[in-house]
Amino acid sequence: MKRRTFLGTSAAIGAALAAPRLSLAQNTRVLRFIPQANLSSLDAVAGTQYVVRNAAMMIWETLYGVDSNFVPHPQMAEGHTVNADFTDWTFKLREGLTWHDGEKVTTKDVAASLNRWMVRDTMGQRIKASLEAMETPDDRTIRLKLNKPFPKMLFAIGKSNAPVCLIMPERIAKTDPFQLIKEYVGSGPMKFNTAEWVPGSKAIFEKFAAYKPRSEKGDLLSGGKVMNFDRIEWVIIPDAATAGAALQNGEVDWWENPISDLVPLLKKNAKLNVDIGDPLGNIGSLRINHLHPPFNNPLARKAVLMALSQTDYMQAVVGDDTNLWKVCPSYFTPGTALYTEEGGEILKGKRDYEGAKKLLKEAGYNGEKIRLIVATDVGITKAEGDVTADMLAKIGMNVDYVATDWGTTGTIRAKKDAPSAGGWNIFHTWHAGADCINPAPYTALDAGGDKAWFGWPKSDAVQQGISDWYAAPDAAAEKKAAVAINKASFENVTYGPTGFFLQYTSWNKNVSGVVKAPFPVFWGVSKS
């Protein structure tokens, strides 16, 4: 599989850099940012797209927040108390918390937010399953009584991956957790300017004057979120060449994920910084719908893995530079404590197209259309989708390539309808390495059937391994559980890992405070 080509010739690059300039405000306290994709919603509970999570975390906050070492610290909470067996948790809110509309934050808001989040999140579901009572004795105190120990409570409510345990006003938090919220009032450092929101073009965030940052130094989701801008403008530029031109011309300040084709050009520009955005990287994902034929049969899912070449996928996504990618026959992040390749043998060695065809025949596949949903406005998913279409054709599958955008992909993937009725068989995404370090934040690993993430995989063996990890008394037991999870996940083909890769981020040198993180951190960033 050859490297995809975004830019045909140097002339094309020159034409892109000559694109019309974006209008620039005179206010120096404005940051202009190109996100990874279009922002189609702001609900990081009902939806799990990273671009949605990244925006939502400026607007809403969490009771606790993880730092760059994934250790949770008090954020909206002043602190907590817990009994010896981790079944009785009491949290107290900081004084003076207010919503963007001026109303006071109370524990009724917290209770409603927790209840909505617990329906959608895998860790939240575990809390909900053992929750005996949730009490709000006063406006600043909330108590959770469980019938089973849950020592990972602080991480659950403070983690950065979606569904994020964002605290919203009660009236908003009462929205059906499977429906997107329609009101964007938070207590975080930035307010969302709904009036200026143009999906597919721009999204505007304005500083919340009444926000009171914590006194501690900001670190990821913990500490003081000091905003040095009155306004943060997200500028949606799907075309990579145009985005590169805007960055080089100073029309935007920061490009979240420049494509690797343009990185050499950006590095030559003395006015720009170019660096790896997140050292923990990403795991590419071929997500399979387990509900409908042919992939409700594990043989058909295994046929895909027999033909899946991670090298093809990674070269398509990031190119030939092997410093930026590696094969990853694992569901866990390379270089982290739980990484294991046991069970991943099916992804190693020469790809077996004939063997895959035989498995498909055993599974009863007879040429039915495979509805492949491809978000063509995101470089990662477009590249992966093209590789998959080619690979499926090689093993004799009839591919229905549905080219769409990332926002529409988010809508389609939530449908459980048959592919012939508007549903899907396969879509592509990626999982941040920070979310794949262990089962706790790893929504995509869950195999709980109807309650699992999109694709709704079901495996008692996977779920048992995850339970064993939660109950593990030490690191050795955690690793043993991870090995069992990895083996069971490959046996079940929960999804198809397409490899591990790193991504660049680039920003103007007059911007300071940009940190390496699993998501763009705007607090602490400033511009001279």
Image (spheres, helix red, strand yellow):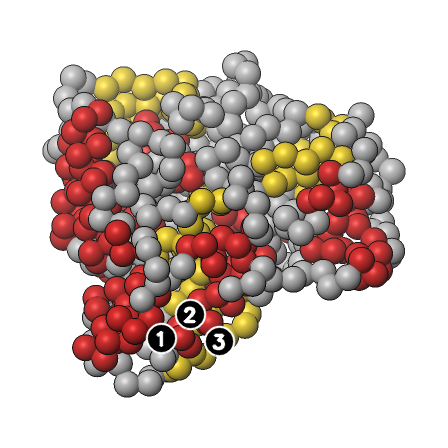
Looking at the picture, how far across and down is residue 512, in whole percent? 71, 26
The picture quadrant where one finds residue 132 is top left
Q: Residues within 10 Å of mark 1 (few under 14, many from 20)?
A: many
Looking at the picture, how far across and down is residue 141, in whole percent? 33, 24
Are the residues tagged 2 and 1 within 8 Å (C-beta)? yes
Tell me the residue at 20%/56% (across/down).
Answer: 491
Q: Residues within 10 Å of mark 3 (few under 14, many from 20)?
A: some
Instruction: Decide if residue 115 is in sight here.
Output: no
Q: CA distance from mark 1 to mark 3?
A: 16 Å
Amino acid of disc 3: Tyr
Pointer 1 residue: 395
Amino acid of disc 1: Ile
> In the image shown, does 42 or 310 lie closer to the viewer?
310
Which of the labelled discs sits on residue 80, or is there none? Answer: none
Up-down relation of residue 411 to residue 311 (above or below): below
Q: Earlier in the sequence, mark 3 or mark 2?
A: 2
Pointer 2 residue: 391
Pointer 3 residue: 401
- Left or right for 259, reference 390: right
Tell me the residue at 73%/64% (across/down).
Answer: 8
Amino acid of disc 2: Met
